[in-house]
Amino acid sequence: MKMKTILLAALAAAALSSASYAEDKKTVAYIAPSLDISYWQWVGYGVKEKAKELGMDYVEYTSENSPAKQMDNARTAVTKGVSAIVIGPVSSTSTPPLLDYLAKQKVPIAFAGIGPQPGLTNYTSSVTANNYETGKAQAKFTCELAKERGSKKVGMLSLPQDRENAQKYLKGAKEAFAAAGCDLVQMLETRGLTISEAVTQANDLLTANPDIKAIYGMYDEAGTGAAKVVETRGLNGKIGITVADGSPTTIALLKKGAIQGIFFQEAVGQGIDGTQQVYNALTGAPVTQDMALVMPLVTADKVDSPEAKKVIARVFPPSN
Amino acid sequence: MEPGSAQSLGTTGNLPGVGLASARKTLIEASNVEKSYGATRVLRGVSFQVRAGEIHALLGGNGAGKSTLIRIITGLTSRDAGGIDLRSSKADRTSPIIAVVHQELALLPELSVAENIGIVHARSGWSLISRRRMREIALGALRLIDPAIGEEIIDLPARKLSLHEGQIVEIARALSTGAEVLLLDEPTANLTAGETAKLFSVLKRLVREEGIGIVFVSHRMREIRELCDVCTILRDGVTIANAAPLASLSDGEIVQQMGQPTQRQATHRNPQQNPRQGSPIELLGPGDVRISILSGTILGLAGAPAGPTGLIAALVGAGPGAGWRLSGEGFGDRFPSPAAAARAGIGFVSGDRATKGILSQLPIVDNVLAARRVRERRRIVAAAERQECRDLVSALKLKAGSIWDLPASLSGGNQQKLLVARLLGLPLRMVVLEEPTRGVDIGTKHDIYGLIRQMADAGAIIIWWSTENVELLELCDAIFAFDTDGRPKGFLPEDRYTEGGLAELTGMAA
Amino acid sequence: MTDATNGTTTTNKLRTTRFRVPAVLFSYRTEVAIAAAIVVLLLAVGMFVPAALSMGNLQNIIQAAAPLIIMSLGVLLVVVTGGIDLSVGSVFSLTGMVTALAMASGADGLTASAAGLAVGLVFGSINGLLVTVVGLAPFVVTLITYAVAGSLAFIVTNGRSMPIGAPDFWLLNSGEIIPGIPNHLLFCIVLMVALEYVLRKVVVGRWFYAVGSSAIAARLLGIPVLRIKFAAYVASSLLASFAGLLTVSYILNAEATAGASLMLQAIAAVVIGGASLFGGTGSAIGAVLGALMITCIQNGVNLIGVNSFWQGSVTGAAILLAVLIDRFSNKNRI
């Protein structure tokens, strides 16, 4: 008797929920590679806000860095009847089967942060940072900082070089360093992406090369770590620090003058732009397939300007 | 815990109120103790007293409940019903210090011998350790049993000790506590005759001079008669005889009350009946020793442990083996590993059944079939195996609830049977047994003798090391003896095939 | 009777020639070997980068090693009892997050630190209870708390890293209670000496070894096995918690991923330091040296500028070496 009631209730609930999908309200799913990195939370925030603005529902999945889980998520989303997907893929190489599947299901998909495998065309849009150009710009700026401080020698705290974006940053950076006449004397790669590791590495970097005058930080924690080390050693201002990504922590350091410039990775912006593109695809408006955004630089002196505030709004949610 | 320094054990104690039988105070009184494990009622109302100044034999077959009773008295196991009353004869204590030598060695393998003995002497967890004092206590205690052994092993981690040395350390620990009650569960199982004699004289002196109470569990009638004053006999969890004076009972009566068959079974040697075929296998030892054995023969090894263990190590591929080599059709010079020995058709039952025999986390069925599966290259766990196992279990009279129980549910003797049964019916050329009857009651012993004879009749060579000369004489076709230094001494001649002859040859009375 | 005793003498004579070694040096042989290996490693790196041997770099190594050292000491206690603690990295992270969160909501440094250490106490107690009272396998229990504490570290601040507000909080790590010795070094020394003393010289310390050596035998001897195990897990979590606090005090920032890589490093440090994962062996000095060794390898790899992907392989080689030294200086019988 009791069992029957429960079954009936469950059936009713299922019917109701499927009915809600049958309505005309569109849903966008955001599939993050993992949600323990704030960057992917911020992309999600952008997707969510833009979806609200466009009158769409929002659902969120996390692939826990597993391509298989990512595929499962996509299937689940499609089965649940979502209209479009914005994805931060686990890796570029994990995307071909995913795109084949979504193309068959005719669900538009936009990439944020990390693009699809090169050579593929069956996706709606790819909104990424232009790592190569950003690498060039950051290296040029870092080199200037070093020269102002009387040396051509610079060091780098890099992302693991097995990552595609890290390779592109480095390629651009090396070219720019060469062009500007700077010496990249040492590069250390992170493994844990933590501030404490960056502190240790920055210390080791300066111990091995005491004549370095500027540090290129390829990820946010690198900037924080390098700033910490420079401060401890009493070298404030004597060693220039630049950093890519940007967060409340590094912005605070930028305001203090402990960091000279941040190249902002527009996480929220990528979510917003990606959502706009899939919406366009759904409504028949024109789409831009490849949007490679050069990361905007904000320097210490301009951090409170309206332009800077506009940039930062596209980086992380205001609550941060 | 009151630390009893080793010195005090050596001097004459002047305890008041001890000495006369009439004044003997009851230290432990267990009345109607009951204990069940699941559906098995191990103790069904056991009563038992330990009195000061008395050596009390606790007797019973395997599974009669002796070890359980000891565990309940020492508080390691809870009881379901009944009472345990503890009283000290010393004015300043309410309950006596009880020291136990457990049947399975309770040594801490990574700690040194000194610490293994000294660790029970701490007043509390927060007291400091004095290595010097620990060593003194340990040395003093070890010397009581074997003056030669102390210095040599005192700093070794216990895992480097032989079974024999481990046993001595454990007894020394119990003696060193200055206990009023000593519970000794098969303490002599791993001792040589000389050490046993020394232990007994220490125990007798402690009883006489210090007035302590001793509980002695053993299957060796001779030792019981030599040492004990009274006996309590358990059968199936019930007290059959309660503190009966030993002098009033004959061996036959005791065995009968234990519920064991009194008749010796027809397992003992009968050289004419075994047709021996094939070319002999030869064991070549140090100093041109040559032992030639035909299949179907039971060869006994006797003497101080060092000798047989060396030979056995060589036979089962467990080490260099003191210069022993093997020669015979299908056998290499020596085995590089135990696996090589097993492949060559040599079966082995280790004397260390707890760590080198039983697969403790696998049910009985897997334990019984383990060797078969390897030998016969079985790939699939077939349903037929279950029947095969049940047949074996019932043929062996294993007291097991179910073949899916863990071996821990079996008594020590039944575990030993299980280990021997593993090799039963396998096409083995040689079976090596290390003290398969250690800590086993008479009934089970005869079951195991039967199994051994059965394997010999199937054509295997049996190499059997035992420290009980009587059973060697009873069962073996030939006995090879080692002297007290472990050097090979030679075969026991046919005309001297008696206990006296064997004692003379080995230098050890058993 | 005399003949029989002669029998045992011979077996022992055989052994005497094999095993006689000076006792004190012998019992610290692993530690001496690692210390030597660390010196050799530093000198080798110094050949490439002279600055490696500078005072500054040595201070860097100590600072980088301090949290790992403290965490390793805790893990050691568990490993000695024959257990394992996989939750230390997560407890480390969660402690930092809770402390930072407490400060952000207005608590002063002391209260916030207490809140952080409470994390260690709670998770240590959970580990201890599940292992002792419930009787689950330590690997499983701490795998559970590893996962739970790890995810809580993200949940409490939604994965964001938290800056530290309290202005004097840096003193915990970098202040000098004893002038000339930064606190993190002081803590390491005090904890190491205290633990080594307890483990070697106090009865309760020997009980840890006894339990790890054979829990069954220890129980038969009347040693409070369950209480010892419980204490080991609580101590391990508390020390991990304290290490987390120290790190937060150092970088003035709490991160949810801070301890992720530390758990395996701590276990590696303990193993390099001569402890057996089967229990019953290991020393506090060894664990500290193991942690230093791992940090020196990282430092050396960074200074020389080898691709940091090699760090793992070099650390692995160090573990192998340490275990082999132990194995061959200490042959087991068959």
Image (tube, coloured by chain):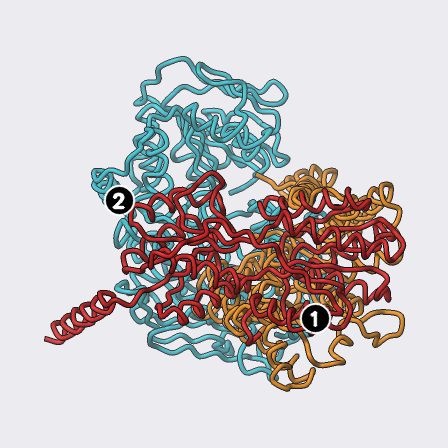
Q: Nearer the viewer, residue B108 or B189?
A: B108
- The image shows residue C270, relative to residue C305, as above or below, that is below
- The image shows residue C128, relative to residue C111, as above or below, that is above
User: Colour in which chain B is shown?
Assistant: cyan
Q: Nearer the viewer, residue B502 or C272?
A: C272
Where is residue A217 drawn, in percent x and y?
Answer: 70, 56
Residue found 83% across the figure and 42% down from its top: C44
Side (left or right) of A175 relative to C122: right
In what element is the residue under mark 2? helix
Instruction: Tell me the orange chain.
Output: C
Name the residue that disc number 1 marks. Answer: A303
- Indicate which disc residue B393 carries: 2
- Confirm whether circles 1 and 2 share one chain: no
Where is residue C297 drawn, in percent x and y?
Answer: 74, 48
Residue found 80% across the figure and 54% down from its top: A144
Residue found 38% across the figure and 78% down from its top: B83
- The image shows residue C55, relative to residue A302, as above or below, that is above
Residue found 59% across the figure and 46% down from its top: B194
Q: Quadrant of the N terminus of chain A?
A: bottom left
User: Is there any visible trace of residue B499 in the rendered image?
Assistant: yes
In what element is the residue under mark 1? loop
User: Colour in which chain A is shown?
Assistant: red
Q: How far apart, in angstroms, are the residues tagged by discs 1 and 2?
A: 85 Å
